[in-house]
């Protein structure tokens, strides 16, 4: 008999593949769980960030969604999206700046740090999902996040000890006390980012 954990993983697997492959925003593939996308729009409306950093552009739908939310919320802001192997073509939007490269490359970190200076920043991390890379991103970009805004780590559904984003979050929270898990972001029960919505105190 399958354990509850295995049954839950089976139940999540099919919808996640559909989300990843079929879910679109304005016709562009956007690899986001719809309940998490809803939380993003709540955060953008409340925080009104004028600088958003996304790592892991994929096909560009996520960045396009974020830029659209800035438009809808009437925020004069910009989205910087970093991808080491960008898809072609990426969507065009006046608020999006595409960057090709490794998100923890010192030159890119310096560029983002400079561009975000004096801005009300929001950061979402969704590139390589191994612990070492995610923790390096968190250490590189946490200062971009404004007080009251969020550092969002995607795909923390990986279980503890699997060497994924969840482990990076736990490690980061032990060394950096400027953030806390916003448990209100768990209220829909279905999320790809458990303990991944970190609010700056």
Image (tube, helix red, strand yellow):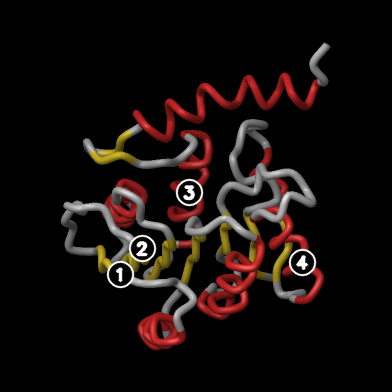
C-alpha span from label 3 to label 2: 20 Å
Above-or-below relation of 58 to 7? below
Q: Please name the residue shown 50% across and 53% down the image.
A: 43
Residue 132, x across and y down, in percent: 64, 68
CA gap, disc 3 to disc 4? 24 Å
What residue is shown with label 4?
A: 171
Secondary structure category for the residue under label 1: strand
Q: Which of the labelled discs sits on residue 100, or is there none? A: 1
Residue pointed to by mark 3: 40
Q: Are marks 3 and 4 in contact (CB under 8 Å)?
A: no
SS class, disc 2: strand
Q: Is residue 116 above or below residue 76?
A: below
Label 1 or label 2, whichever comes before in sequence order: 2
Q: Is residue 89 visible?
A: yes
Q: Which mark is residue 83?
A: 2
Expressed as whole percent of the image width and height from the top left, the position of residue 179 reads: 70, 68
Q: Nearer the viewer, residue 62 or 78?
A: 62
């Amino acid at each position: 008999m399958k354990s509850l954990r295995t049954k839950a993983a089976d139940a999540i697997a099919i919808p996640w593949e559909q989300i990843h492959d079929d879910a679109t925003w304005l016709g562009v593939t956007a690899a986001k769980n719809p309940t998490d996308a809803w939380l993003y729009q709540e955060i953008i409306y409340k925080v009104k960030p004028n600088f958003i950093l996304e790592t892991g552009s994929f096909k560009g739908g996520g960045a396009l969604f974020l830029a659209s939310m800035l438009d809808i919320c009437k925020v004069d802001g910009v989205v910087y999206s970093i991808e080491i192997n960008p898809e072609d073509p990426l969507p065009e939007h006046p608020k999006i700046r595409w960057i090709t490269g490794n998100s923890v490359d010192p030159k890119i970190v310096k560029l983002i740090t400079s561009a975000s200076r004096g801005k009300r920043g929001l950061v979402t991390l969704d590139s390589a999902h191994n612990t070492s890379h995610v923790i390096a991103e968190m250490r590189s970009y946490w200062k971009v996040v404004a007080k009251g805004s969020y550092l969002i780590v995607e795909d923390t559904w990986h279980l503890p000890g699997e060497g994924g984003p969840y482990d990076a979050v736990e490690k980061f929270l032990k060394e950096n006390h400027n953030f806390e898990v916003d448990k209100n972001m768990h209220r829909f029960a279905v999320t790809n980012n458990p303990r991944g919505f970190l609010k700056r105190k």
